[in-house]
Image (tube, helix red, strand yellow):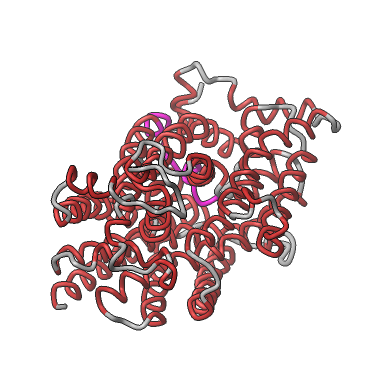
Amino acid sequence: MAIKLSLLILFFAVMVGIGLYCRRHASDVAGFVLGGRSVGPWLTAFAYGTSYFSAVVFVGYAGQFGWRYGIAATWAGLGNAFLGSLLAWVVLGRRTRVMTQHLDSATMPEFFGRRFESRRLKLAASVIIFLFLIPYTASLYNGLSRLFAMAFDVDYELCVAVMAILTGVYVIAGGYMATAINDFIQGIIMLVGICAVIGAVLQSQGGFLTALDSLARVSDPTVSNTPGVFASFFGPDPLNLLGVVLLTSLGTWGLPQMVQKFYAIKNEASISKGTVISTAFAAIVAGGCYFLGGFGRLYSDKVDVASQGYDAIIPTMLSGLPTFLIAVVVILVLSASMSTLSSLVLTSSSTLTLDFIQGNLIKHMGEKQKLRWMRALVVVFIAISVVLAIIQYRSSVTFIAQLMGISWGALAGAFLAPFLYGLYWKRTTRSACAASFFFSTTVMLANILVGELFPPLLRSPINCGAFCMLAGLVLVPLVSLFTSPPDSRQVEKIFSCYDQTITVTMRDSIGRPERKK
């Protein structure tokens, strides 16, 4: 217990200390929200990765999908690395950074408002972000509580309160830069921790080959009658596994807390380096989490999924580890959860302030007033998420994976297609953007309320969210072709930021605009 508490206290002290140190970077809106658009490749890549992977992945997704698909669940981690990280950086990174600077937009709703010249789209996007980030935040607390209960036997409400307060302190004090530096430290902890945990768990099962052989002997007639299916390449249910891969990988392309990382990166060279770093980070962390979860059925004699739920699988697997490794696991998941929570509350508070309150509830806001509102809303958002997390825990409404599926499905389904086409296709219209917003939010809300009326494959929020994303990629170009085109002069003006893509000047324009000729 002394080892666990010592590591926790040290961890919290470092996080808060960095927040206080970064106060000078958060003296204006650009610094608080984007770190002055001067964040380097390592900080940006780790901020992207740690915002991507949280207790939802480590406890919820790894446990649930490892149990369902066996070792084939590792495909989800590989999809996260190559589709959710590598391809996202290649396709979105540079164009997002250049166009958002050109449009002077600091948030995703602000991008939609200026790219499509629509105040209504900006307001709609800000409301969608606020409403659907809440379920995701509640899921972070739930996953963390499972491990704290295993390691410390500590009350859930106390665990939630401590995590929320300390995250709020360093976000309010240091803004995005404090979040990015903390994410870097937390990312290192996650890399070391996941490798150590995988090694220890496999060793407890006699090594990798022995564990894999034991997994091949596991049978579950309710899932499949194929011998060795849980140790096979594609597992017992490849189609539903594909839905998991798509939602958790392609979904990052439309999540505001992920895409806004590209807004803040320093220059073009940083984007190239960040692509490699982010991909490697995701391959180790996400691939490791799902790979570990794939051996969950070896502990079927110690966990009752029917009564305890999928979220108990990973804590059960870890409960027999040495004390020091359990402390490392707690810090690992705490790091993952706090980094994601800080990203979510910063995204939500900045979006509400800049895209909803400013110009609507308050017509004119100075820099200091904006900062006060954003810091106050960080507190409000954290408080709401804490209350909902406790309510959800006491009522046992749903599993972690389903909470995340609802959030990711609605946000990525609404934003992915209009954001992607808005960066690349001049013909994209505001009507198409609105159609994507309406379609995905309506479908996901219906899935929550009357999910039993959906076709069997789409009753899962995860599959439904993946469907919304893919549907949006078809819906946006179709609606754009059948609606009035945007003003050509305005569109050419917006896309003029890409006219210099083959020149050295463009490379310098992100980081050192004074060198433009």
Nearer the observer, 97 or 59: 59
- Asked if residue 127 shows in the view, the reply is no
Q: Quadrant of the N terminus?
A: bottom left
Q: Residue at x 28, y 66 (%)?
A: 301
Estimate the x, y position of residue 205 in percent, counting from the top left.
17, 54
Q: Residue at x 60, y 57 (%)?
A: 351
Tell me: residue 390, above or below residue 301.
Answer: below
Which secondary structure class fits the magenta region best?
helix
Q: Is residue 44 left or right of residue 101?
A: left
* Residue 261 falls within the magenta-colored stretch: yes
Q: Is residue 273 left or right of residue 29?
A: left
User: In this view, which residue lies farthest toward the top?
Assistant: 502
Give the percent coordinates (x, y) of residue 168.
43, 70
Q: How many marks are shown on the rendered structure?
A: 0
Name which residue lies at 35% across and 41% down: 40
Q: Quadrant of residue 124?
A: bottom right
**Residue 48 appears at what percent x and percent y?**
41, 46
Up the image or down, 369 lies above or below 183; here it is below
Answer with left or right where residue 348 lies relative to residue 323.
right
Bounds of the magenta segment = 256-271
**In which image quadrant can residue 176 be found?**
bottom left
Q: Is residue 34 shown in magenta?
A: no
Pick whichever, 124 or 444, lies toward us: 444
Q: Quadrant of residue 460?
A: bottom right
Closest to the observer, 62 or 229: 229
User: Which residue appears at 46% of the width and 57% of the height?
Assistant: 343
Q: Is residue 254 among the parts visible in the rendering?
A: yes
In x, y percent, where is residue 456?
64, 51
